[in-house]
Image: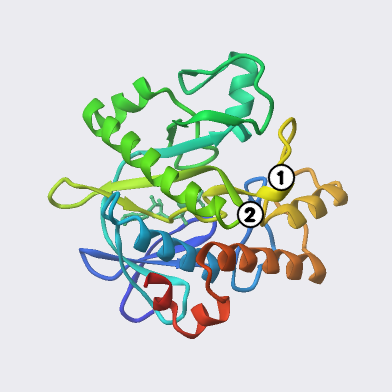
Amino acid sequence: MADAVHVGSGKVRELYALDDARLLLVASDRISTFDVVLPTEIPDKGRVLTGLSGFWFARTQSVCPNHLLALRPDGRSTECRRLRMLPIECVVRGYLSGSGWKDYRTTGEVCGHRLPAALRESDRLAEPIFTPATKAASGHDENITRTQAAALVGAEQLAEVERLSIALYQLAADHARGCGIIIADTKFEFGLDGGGRLVFADEALTPDSSRFWPADEYKPGGPQPSFDKQFVRDFCERTGWNKTYPGPQLPADVVAGTRARYIEAFERLTSMKFSTYLANPTTVLK
Ligand SMILES: Nc1ncnc2c1ncn2[C@@H]1O[C@H](COP(=O)(O)OP(=O)(O)OP(=O)(O)O)[C@@H](O)[C@H]1O
Ligand SMILES: [Mg+2]
């Protein structure tokens, strides 16, 4: 890319600096499961994630300003405002799953929230809870209490990101529920602009940053099928893979099934054909 300097790679995205004020986030088709990037890509996955983020950024502006400047015609590249990122992940949970369920089972609490006794895995919580985590440079993010998070970003700042995170989750979860998708939990990232204002950044409510469950199959009391990665997870389990690097190659039917589910999530949530998005990504912002 002639106009950009490569400044970093994540598991899924490449980061380029366009100038002092702007970044380009390019979402690849890489897929990770059990935190390992697999050797096989899912065609168009990066476009699905970029389009969904654009969709949510356009629809949450009344809650919070965000970093989005433009979607490029390739459908996988986002021009955004370059921010000073807060060193925490702002997780909101509406349902008890993943590390939240694990913490609850051992302590009865999640990030300092004491929850009622006898909740089951995947139960809906009475109210969504804010459960921050550290942004680990390597390895797994770690859940922290709000007191610990306040020590990292300041009490006032934390109260504000908590309020914004819950409001963003509520808006998106209500919308998704009408599309037959439960957003069990999601992770937001915020940054500060030059004027010290909080800005919603990174990706927005994608299958990579959230747990999406098909609402018609919801059955608390155990783990739920994930909307997107279930084919991949099931296949990986069947191969007996030990869940450390390197992961297994995916066969064509697993790739096709997974791609179809990502696209289905996109089409259900946006009420737009994925082909319409590919023809002109900016339609998702309208
Ligand atoms: N507007 C922004 N300004 C500055 N940095 C940003 C902005 N939006 C996102 N980022 C940062 O860019 C990076 C995106 O990279 P990516 O999500 O691919 O990898 P990662 O979060 O480092 O690792 P992982 O693969 O675990 O997600 C993150 O560190 C994120 O905090
Ligand atoms: Mg990330």
Most foreground residue, 123 or 133: 123
Q: State the residue at coordinates (69%, 25%).
A: 120
The kind of residue on which mark 1 rests is Thr
Residue 193 pos. (x, y %): 20, 52
Q: State the residue at coordinates (71%, 49%).
A: 216
Most foreground residue, 283 or 154: 283
| For discs 2 and 1, the disc positioned in front in the rendered view | 2
Ligand 1 neighbours mark 2 (CB distance < 8 Å): yes
Q: Which image quadrant: the C terminus?
A: bottom left
Q: Residues within 10 Å of mark 1 (few under 14, many from 20)?
A: few
User: Which label sits on residue 244?
Assistant: 1
Q: Secondary structure at mark 1?
A: loop
Determine the residue located farthest toward the bottom in the rendered image. 279
**Quick check: 138 above or below 103?**
below
User: Which label sits on residue 266?
Assistant: none
Q: State the residue at coordinates (47%, 72%).
A: 76
Q: Is residue 154 left or right of residue 78?
A: left
> How far apart, in angstroms, are the residues tagged by discs 2 and 1?
11 Å
Most foreground residue, 282 or 127: 127
Q: What residue sits right under mark 2 in the picture?
A: 32
Residue 55 pos. (x, y %): 43, 64
